[in-house]
Amino acid sequence: MGLNIPSFYGYFTAHRSIAANQAALNTINHNIANVNTQGYSRQRVDLAINSPFPPATRSNYLESGQLGQGVKILGISRTHDLFLDGQIRTQNSAKGMQDIIKDYMQQMEGIVAEPIGYGASSAMTDFFAAAQALSIRADDQTARTTFIQSAKNMLDIFRQEASQLMEIRTGVVGDASIPSTVTSSLAAITTAEINTELKQLANVNSQIITVVGAGGQPNDLLDQRDLLLDSLSKKININVEYTGSEQVTVRLGNNILVRGKDVLNTLNIVPNTTVTADDDPALIELSSNPGVSVNANITGGTLGGMLAVGGNAPGAVTIRSFVGQLNTLFTELANQVNALQGGGYDYYGNSPSTTPPNDEIFTLAGGTGLEIFRYSVNPDILADPKLIAAADGSGAFAGVGDGRNAMAMARLADVQIGALGSSTMHQFFNDELSKLGVSSKSAKDSSEVLGNVIAQLEQRRESFQGVNMEEEMIDMLRFQRSFEASAKMMSTIDKVMDTIINRIF
Amino acid sequence: MGISRISSGYMIDRGLFNLQKNLLTTSSLQEKIASGRNISFPSDNAIGMAQLLRINLDAQRDSRFDKNISEGLSEMSAAETAVKGIVNVAHRARELATLGSNGTNSPSTLQAYEKEVDSLLQQLVQLGNTTYGGRYIFSGFQTDQPAFSIAGSDVTYDGSPSMGDFQRQVQVEKNIFVPLNFPGDQLLGEVSVTPGSPPTVAGSGLLYDLTKLKYDMQNGDFDGIRAGIDAIVASQTNVLNIQSELGNRMNHLELTKGRLDDAHIVQAREIAKIQEVDMPKVISELNFQQTIYQASLGMMSKIMETSLVNFLR
């Protein structure tokens, strides 16, 4: 006995074929529509052979074999490489950080204005030259005025550079002594963006859970989530872990930020009120654990870069460290000059050490914070440059033409100073500038290299998941033709049925 | 892992990436040409910048030394003129002493000689009080007051004591100092006269010699005048020594100036080597870069034109 075929059997096979081809055509439509959409992964209809008829059972001896039941749609999948994603995100975090460091280092270089402009180094040279001139012409009012003006000019330049640098720092991470600057800093804005994206991520996760729960395949939501994760990874170093049911868990260090549809932690930025406030004006805390800084965990992304460049990690060149070195340099210079001023004789033959405050060229105001912002040139001496102690103080006053003490001030330029690592002042400054240059160069290079690596990875990802027009065109023709063939099949089967139903009798 | 599949987006991304790279290179070349500098920021070349700063520092310091030398030379020229005048005075005094030592001279002749000696004395004091730029150059550090003051027949040196320490100096090189002036008492000495019959003349140097000569002539003391000749010669030699010492110092300054000028040329060359852009090289690089850029643009447009879409009807 032969195989018993149900009468309407052919309709269903043709119908499945038409449906599969239609689904494929619509997917191609979707692909073409998204050819330029960022983060889009091309989609494919996964087709499989439908299980044959009749199914094999113990009671069913298939003596005439099985009849095919056509095609079936397994699902619509996206072409995507999670491994590439992970690599790209790691590099994104590193590049985000280096980009920020590079940008701010370049700004610092612009402010310091060496080697092309007039900066601290030139101002120091001018000061020492003025001291030289004074040593030859100690009796000359002009030489005295030039000396004290160049001292003031030098202080102004140092302070201007320091304060411009500190302003930049305030813009990045704020100034802990003014809490509002921390909460309006660039780091705070970035933190807010991160929080928004964490919430969006949880939201997308929740939608994905719903779709997957209903047995669906949320390709477009997955793409959207990948984009969010990419964007987050540029801002902060996150660990992404894929768990069952297409869920992701996002961690910062060991702390979970988002798990599935729940945001467990957002980031808060608070002004540092502890003794380390000068080193790290802004502290990032987790919403579930206030009072505990996680700055040490933020080692990548733009936020990581901001914390690094605005912080003061030992050994690193940061805005604060450079200002600190400028401060050390100027304080040392002021101390040395003041010591000489106190030990000489002024134009009137008086020893300034007996007539304070004339014993100081640079007066340090009381208070806290960097000395460089508290120094001023002694107003008495500015008003009467004859009070400059140009004459040697080792013996009796030798006369108004005595410029030996001024010469000693000029020769400070050659003195190796212990507090400056046994360098001269110029050497010290040049060393600091070289360090800045090297750090800036290294950040620039890293950023460039990482940019190339990311471009390579993204191109690889794009080559894998991107839409190719020709491919889609060819597929379009292919499925169009098979659609037409299925439709033809349908009408043929219909004609067969017509014969059976209408012509048999 | 090579790339085995090309997506439409890949072509565009890749093309844009390369165009960007070309543009970046072009803009950095343009920056170099516009500024004429290889190093605008420390990060452009940290080592080159450190060298540049060091050379600049040397150059700025040398230019200060150069100014020191110029000022030193001007003041020393003034001193030299004064010392030359003193030598001439000593010379004339010696002539007068030789003439006056002749015992046949009439009292009126001696009186005439004595008058001239007196005027030579005044010249000496005037020369000793030479100023340059308003400062008394033979007063040591006390440049605001005359080196010598006259009270009757006494001439006192009022400047800083004649010790090595009390010379004004200019720095002409790292660690090298050249004294600017000679204390006046070394140059002319001092003299004081105690009235009496004959008056007692005490002191040293030309001022003493000439005052002594004046009184000897006044008193017709021919032995004294004769003895004075040798004293004047000795003092004249002392002044001549000072004159040659001054010449040596000026020589030293001139030589240092020459050395600094040479160094300046070397420094300028070094700076140029590090900092100056090799224009022909950079411009040809720029042209090359532009050609590449145009080629990539052309290629991009060709690739983007071709698509299967154009052939499907």
Image: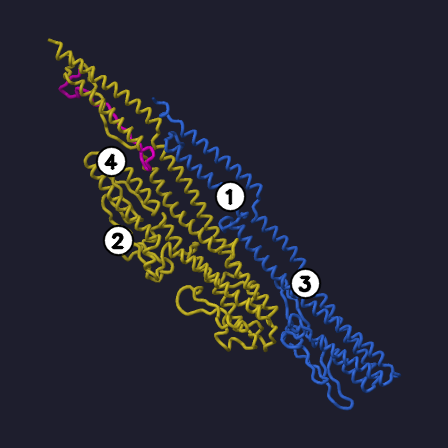
- Which of the two labelled residues, at mark 1 and mark 3, occupies the earlier sequence position? 1
Q: What colour denotes chain B?
A: blue
Residue type beneath disc 4: Pro
The region drawn magenta spans A34-62
Residue B30 numbered mark, or none: 1
Q: CA distance from mark 1 to mark 3?
A: 46 Å
To which residue does mark 3 refer?
B253
To which residue does mark 4 refer?
A218
To which residue does mark 2 refer?
A287
**Crowd around label 3: few <14 · some 14–19 · many ≥20 (10 Å):** many
Q: Helix or strand or loop: what does disc 4 sit on?
A: loop
Q: Specify the subunit that label 3 lies on.
A: B
Residue type beneath disc 3: Leu
Q: Specify the subunit that label 4 lies on.
A: A
Query: In this rendering, is residue A480 above or below B184?
Result: above
Residue A95 in picture, x, y percent from top left:
39, 45
Q: Residue furthest right?
A: B104
Q: Helix or strand or loop: what does disc 2 sit on?
A: loop
